[in-house]
Amino acid sequence: MKKPVSTLKPVIKWSGSKRKVANQLSYLIPDGNTYFEPFVGGGSMLPFRKIKQGIANDIIPELVELWIAIKNKPEKTAYEYNIRWERLQKEGHQVYYEIRDKFNNTKNCFDFLFLTRTCVNGLIRYNSKGEFNNSFHLTRPGINPKTLKKIILNWNYYLKHVEFHNLDYTEVLANVKKNDFVFLDPPYGGNKDRYTKKAFDLNIFFKELERLNTIGAKWVLTFDGNAGKRKYNYELPRALYQHKTFIKTGNSPFTKMMKTTVDAVYESVYLNFQPSNKLLLNFDQQIGQKSALQGSLEM
Ligand SMILES: C[S@@+](CC[C@H](N)C(=O)[O-])C[C@H]1O[C@@H](n2cnc3c(N)ncnc32)[C@H](O)[C@@H]1O
């Protein structure tokens, strides 16, 4: 089933998602042989990737398993959500906690989908033991299964040519060749990853970027940013990139929860190539505009 990419709703809700700016960012994607996305998370760039063949990866096993299920077994994925959701409506919120306990033992990807759709603010959160620990969102019933089924089937179309992996990003980047393209949306430097609880090592990351430059692969990286007066600044070494621009990625989730006012969040976007004037013009024209998409990916 093909739905215009501009109207696609998220299939996997992910904090730090690039959903609102995916269309705009896609204007920076050049031609290439294979599209690589080593930090795929909620995958918001995938339908916008412009390059048909894709390799997507994330460190979280249940997330990758869910992506593979959406790709290979969309009907079953929708059905599995439906049975859990029906039980929730009939038996009440203890079903959520029962499924959460089960998930923490088995890491079943359909339990994971259900939890992401019914937990507080859809926030995927793990404790230090690697257990999912967010609570049930009492005031929301969770997305209706019929609606989610449509979303899953729509996304399935855009995943046909994507191969998913569950590896450390360095292992995926090892397969990138000349004329491939890599979209990079890593965790903020120094921040502990929500799953591995390890800080993201910027030295290793910078070395990987340098290596990609050497082999002649192009990349776009969304990186450091600022929200209001707070800066999350991890300037990329100047020698690594050719072009830098900014993008408004939304409002800080932290400030959303803690304060009544919200801060705009800007992220830097780095390119290891000089984009053509046409590409830049299209990108700039998108700034401040809501998802005014002109084309969509033909599979
Ligand atoms: C900022 S999120 C990506 C969000 C994504 N662009 C989206 O629109 O939803 C970063 C992702 O990197 C993953 N990650 C963190 N460390 C990783 C590693 N060492 N290797 C692969 N993936 C990693 C996290 O699990 C997370 O999903």
Image (cartoon, rainbow, N blue to C red):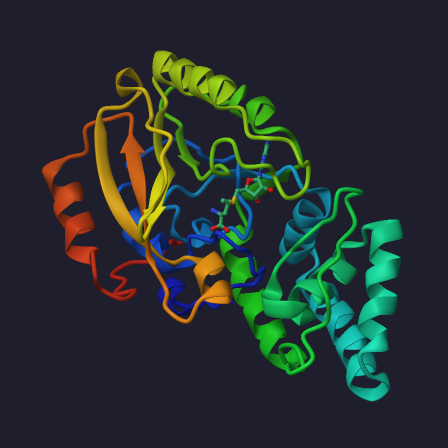
Q: 235 or 37, which lies in front?
A: 235
Q: Residue at x 71, y 49 (%)?
A: 126
Q: Residue at x 74, y 48 (%)?
A: 127
**For residue 167, which quarter of the picture?**
top right
Locate residue 185, reporting x and y percent. 45, 39
Q: Is residue 125 above or below residue 145?
A: above
Q: Is residue 53 above or below residue 167?
A: below
Can I make out residue 299 in this image?
no
Locate residue 22, reporting x and y percent. 36, 53
Q: 133 or 175, which lies in front?
A: 133
**For residue 165, which quarter of the picture?**
top right
Q: How many marks?
A: 0
Is residue 220 toward the left or the right of residue 282 in the image? right
Name the residue furthest bottom: 90
Q: Residue at x 22, y 24 (%)?
A: 242
Locate residue 146, reporting x and y percent. 63, 80
Locate residue 52, reporting x and y percent. 43, 43
Q: 237 or 210, which lies in front?
A: 237
Is residue 278 toward the left or the right of residue 143 in the image? left
The quarter of the picture showing ligand 1: top right
Q: 287 or 77, which lies in front?
A: 287
Q: Is residue 69 above or below residue 37?
A: below
Q: Is residue 86 above or below residue 239?
A: below
Can I make out residue 293 in this image?
yes
